Image (cartoon, rainbow, N blue to C red):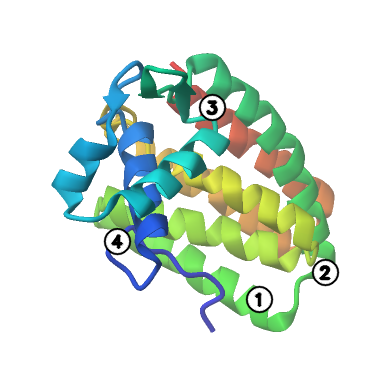
Amino acid sequence: MVLYKHSDDPKSNAPISSSLFSQLQRDILTGKLRPGQKLTEQAICKEYKISRTPVREALRQLETEGLVENILNRGAFVVGLSQQDFEDMFQLRKIYEIQAVKWAIERITDEEMDALEETFEFMEFYTLRNDVDKMLTINAGFHQIIYEASHNRMLRQLLSSYQTYFKYRPQEDIDADNYLTEVLEEHRLIFKAFTENDPEAGAEAMERHIDGSKKRRCK
């Protein structure tokens, strides 16, 4: 059973404004669109061959997310996420991820456990193949299963939103020496806590993983 879905394709069946929002969000988070860069409706309409209405809606969504600032009489400008923003998010994420894994170990169903085991095996496989892109996708899925297994809807929604910000990593970070091995071993300890039904060990392993993620990301 697959308990998560992952797609980076902005040309999915989503409404035009949602697809455009996802594409612009990705471009901002990856640095393709730089802080301070102006976003004009005309340029976006021309590039994506769409009308102004979905462009305006996408820009409103980006402003709500805090990724774009609309300045009166000047237009929309990219804000992006600062180093401090990422550090603040890591602090919050660690608190919520630790609670999620403790609840998940206590509440996980047999079906969810099978999915978690299968996902971890995929992580091992793609680590051996040194496939960073696949590993990042499976990594997100591993965490998503934990969110589902916590059986707490609000916590799941909150952590899923954080995943959006963290899945687009600068290339220099994901190509770091020993990156895949480090990430795999961190997840191995988390998975081991599930197999041993040990919430406290899971919390310790998750804390180690989030601290490791922060070290790799917030340089």
Mark 1 sits on what residue? 112
**CA–CA distance in space, label 3 to label 4:** 27 Å
Q: Helix, strand or loop at disc 1?
A: helix
Q: Residue at x 60, y 35 (%)?
A: 210
In the displayed structure, 141 sits above or below 85; it is below
Residue 145: horizontal and vertical position, in percent?
A: 61, 65
Mark 3 sits on what residue? 214
- Label 2 environment density (alpha carbons within 10 Å; few <14, some 14–19, many ≥20): some
Position of 149 with respect to 181 (left or right) is right
For the N terminus, the quadrant is bottom right
Q: Which amino acid lies under the numbered mark 3 shown in the image of this protein?
A: Lys
Position of 140 with respect to 143 (left or right) is left
**CA–CA distance in space, label 3 to label 2:** 28 Å
Q: Helix, strand or loop at disc 3?
A: helix
**CA–CA distance in space, label 2 to label 4:** 33 Å
Q: Residue at x 32, y 69 (%)?
A: 12
Q: Which amino acid lies under the numbered mark 2 shown in the image of this protein?
A: Arg
The image quadrant that residue 209 belongs to is top right
Q: Helix, strand or loop at disc 4?
A: loop
- Residue closer to the observer: 12 or 187: 12
Mark 4 sits on what residue? 9
**CA–CA distance in space, label 2 to label 1:** 10 Å
- Residue closer to the observer: 72 or 141: 72
Position of 137 with respect to 10 (left or right) is right
In the displayed structure, 209 sits above or below 55; it is above
- Label 4 environment density (alpha carbons within 10 Å; few <14, some 14–19, many ≥20): few
Residue 215: horizontal and vertical position, in percent?
A: 50, 23
Residue 219: horizontal and vertical position, in percent?
A: 43, 16
Q: Earlier in the sequence, mark 3 or mark 2?
A: 2
From the image, state whether disc 3 or disc 4 is nearer to you. Answer: 4
Q: Earlier in the sequence, mark 2 or mark 1?
A: 2
